[in-house]
């Protein structure tokens, strides 16, 4: 029998009525002949409640205890969905991370999956025609025998990892949108749902701000070539609508040059003024930031009027903005700069498309179009299948619409 | 270092503020030089919320899923208390049933502990001076590898079992009363706290209606001779008050004839009228009830006016009243009776005391005193250290006060 992994997030399991709706989706696939494993998140709001208690108990909480506390949310949902399925006459049982087991690293709070043992779940399929209801987001580390969690959006990663482990035909991610769009439909009304998108493109989109899937889950899907289908959990279970299939490049017949436009507000720009222009300058700046676990993204070096110094501009996640400035000030003597400036009022706009590989001058068209709209480009980065532009935040919507139209993505 | 097990129930850990109070009790014992294991229940109300969801998901829920869902409550509290202790500068970690492990039978929903491995907790004591915060009420069954729960009040049983496993000097049960009383102080204002009570007496009291401890936990305490101290969780942690020590008979210097008066409203009386008086009559009635898992307690057989039939009266738990009548009706042809009657408007009053072993006529005094108050006795059972009387419910308070006074238990 073909196997299917289905994943439902917190809003889809917010109460028993919603869980019943999820069970109907599962029943449809069981009736269609699939052996099904369902991965569930905690009921909407529960994780935040639990995290709130952790902070109240200990502001600098021990991540090992945090993991054990927070993982209880998925434990409850998994049991409740199993009961609901049983009540519909479908064999089902819940599986917690440590029962499967889902082995992970010991990075509590953001652990990485190292191995998933599908034996028990597969035995349930073959021996008892039993739906496996899996608590997402959680695993176990050995030999400590302690519960770990995978970090934000970890249930997507659980689902894709499980699909790889049990060799599922597909991993269906049910979410609050009906697929992956050419860009954010809240900004561009002419945005449209993509029928298919390649793993590589989806990975870039997720990394560059599209929130529909977590980066880690797309990485896993790409690594294990798990066809992953993003679809809506609000569909009528009896009449499901289409979503977006994330798949191999070869399985997509026609490629646009640009597939989607993403944007990320989670950026901050830092400029070091009049840095002494000497060998090793980049290392003196970026090694301390890296040691402080701060990711530097775009980097631009501009020679100053006097030729003995240079200005260094780069971006960091806005959450790390203050910390990054503090790290730089601490190393001021070693780096030798005059001043540190910065702003979080910037946005990174990206265009992604596998077609860029075979088309030249794609980014150049964007520079021209944005300039015509009076949008200043602060920094540029490119890779084989995307380019990103750092612009002033107030121009976000205008820039996204301009590029969406420029690359022929507007609907109708 | 001497070891101590402390147990706190749901109202003691209802929120972070209350959990902080619990942590102060723990800190006091750590400062006094104890290696401490703390057993906690779910936050007040949480278990009922989870059970409610289970019933909503599936009216006849699978107890295996129920156990996994409900055990999450203790999981949260254990983590939060560990965090709170850490925040006070005390080494602490949480332990879930499956991590210890607490091995149990596979009677999901009311599993029995078969073994507790104290190795990990003891290593935490000796290697890291680490308080063990243990999720009560839960265990694991092997080889199924599934979470079990111990049933109502199971956290007391977890605590006593753990105390036996790690050879603790004492098991302190913190509860919402400050000890075991000669009778219910809400009925008898002259009731007083007992300084000490023997395991045997406590077991009878718990079995006969005193709600301070679960029967199973007292059985375990008696079996493993774990001195168990019932005390108030509402005490000022800096200035704890006295409670009641449950201990060996030999450790109690002076014995009253009667130590306490208990009552249970959880009784129903069933009378079968005109049962054919033939050999095997008792078996024909009580075997079907036993097979339906209904416990029959007091039994009285009265010969009817005509000598060919007899009336059989017995008591069952009031929760099983309707079911018991249904079972009897189903076997009516085999049993041969004319009519089944019954009432739940009865109460079982019991007097308990080790001193009864060496004193004759203790119960007889009660019959006389109750008769003088116009209280009709419907049934009587006795054992070595207690006697029980079934009376009409409206006389409960009067009967309890009469016996409390009769046996010299009134304060002052």
Image (tube, coloured by chain):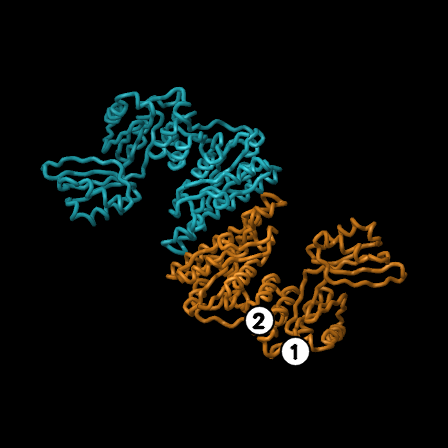
Chain colours: A cyan, B orange
**Is residue A61 positioned above or below B262 on the image?**
above
**Is residue A52 positioned above or below A181 on the image?**
below
Q: Secondary structure at mark 2?
A: strand
- Indicate the position of residue A337 as horizontal and vertical percent values: 15, 44
Q: Is residue B412 left or right of residue A166?
A: right
- Indicate the position of residue A403 as horizontal and vertical percent values: 31, 26
The answer, for residue A331, to whether it is visible in the render is: yes
Q: Nearer the viewer, mark 1 or mark 2?
A: 2
- Indicate the position of residue A412 as horizontal and vertical percent values: 40, 20
Residue situated in front as seen by the camera: B49 or A287 = A287
| Residue at the spot of label 1 | B408
The answer, for residue B405, to whether it is visible in the render is: no
Q: Secondary structure at mark 1?
A: loop
Q: Is residue A109 left or right of residue B204?
A: left
- Indicate the position of residue A318 as horizontal and vertical percent values: 29, 42
* Residue A92 image label: none
**How crowded is the residue under tag 2: few (<14 C-alpha within 10 Å), some, or many (20+)?**
many
Q: Earlier in the sequence, mark 1 or mark 2?
A: 2
* Residue B247 image label: 2
Alpha-carbon span between mark 1 and mark 2: 22 Å
Q: Residue at x 70, y 60 (%)?
A: B267
**How crowded is the residue under tag 1: few (<14 C-alpha within 10 Å), some, or many (20+)?**
few
Quadrant the C terminus of chain B occupies: bottom right
Q: Residue at x 50, y 68 (%)?
A: B169
Residue situated in front as seen by the camera: B125 or B49 = B125
Q: Residue at x 57, y 75 (%)?
A: B251
Q: Residue at x 51, y 52 (%)?
A: B98
**Is residue B286 positioned above or below B263 on the image?**
above
């Amino acid at each position: 029998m073909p196997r299917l992994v289905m994943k439902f997030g917190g809003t889809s399991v917010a109460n028993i009525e919603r869980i019943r709706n999820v069970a109907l989706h599962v029943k449809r696939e069981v009736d269609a002949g699939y052996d099904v494993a369902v991965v569930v998140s905690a009921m909407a709001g529960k994780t935040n409640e639990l995290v709130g208690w952790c902070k109240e108990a200990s502001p600098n909480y021990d991540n090992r205890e945090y993991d054990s506390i927070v993982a209880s949310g998925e434990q409850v949902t998994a049991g409740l969905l199993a009961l609901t399925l049983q009540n519909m006459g479908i064999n089902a049982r819940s599986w917690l991370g440590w029962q499967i087991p889902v082995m992970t690293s010991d990075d509590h709070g953001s652990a990485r999956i190292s191995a998933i043992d599908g034996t028990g779940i597969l035995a349930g399929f073959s021996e008892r025609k039993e739906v496996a209801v899996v608590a997402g987001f959680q695993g176990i580390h050995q030999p400590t025998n302690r519960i770990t969690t995978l970090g934000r959006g970890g249930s997507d990663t659980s689902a894709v990892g499980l699909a790889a482990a049990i060799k599922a035909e597909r991993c269906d991610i049910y979410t609050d949108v009906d697929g992956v769009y050419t860009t954010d439909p809240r900004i561009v009304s002419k945005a449209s749902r993509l029928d298919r998108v390649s793993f590589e493109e989806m990975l870039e989109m997720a990394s560059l701000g599209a929130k529909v899937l977590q980066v880690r889950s797309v990485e896993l899907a790409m690594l294990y070539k798990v066809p992953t289908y993003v679809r809506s959990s609000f569909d009528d279970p009896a009449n499901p609508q289409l979503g977006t299939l994330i798949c191999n490049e070869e399985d997509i017949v026609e490629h646009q040059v640009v597939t989607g436009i993403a944007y990320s507000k989670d950026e901050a720009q830092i400029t070091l003024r009049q840095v002494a222009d000497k060998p090793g300058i980049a290392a003196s700046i970026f090694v301390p930031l890296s040691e402080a676990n701060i990711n530097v993204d775009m980097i631009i070096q501009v020679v100053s009027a006097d030729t003995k110094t240079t200005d260094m501009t780069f971006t960091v996640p806005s959450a790390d903005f203050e910390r990054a400035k503090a790290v730089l000030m601490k190393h001021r003597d070693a780096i030798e700069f005059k001043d540190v400036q910065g702003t979080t009022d910037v946005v990174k706009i990206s265009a992604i498309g596998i077609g860029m590989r075979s088309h030249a001058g794609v980014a150049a068209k964007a520079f021209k179009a944005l300039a015509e709209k009076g949008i200043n480009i602060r920094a540029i980065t490119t890779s084989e299948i995307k380019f990103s532009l750092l612009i002033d935040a107030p121009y976000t919507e205008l820039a996204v619409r301009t590029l969406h139209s420029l690359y022929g993505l507007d609907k109708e």
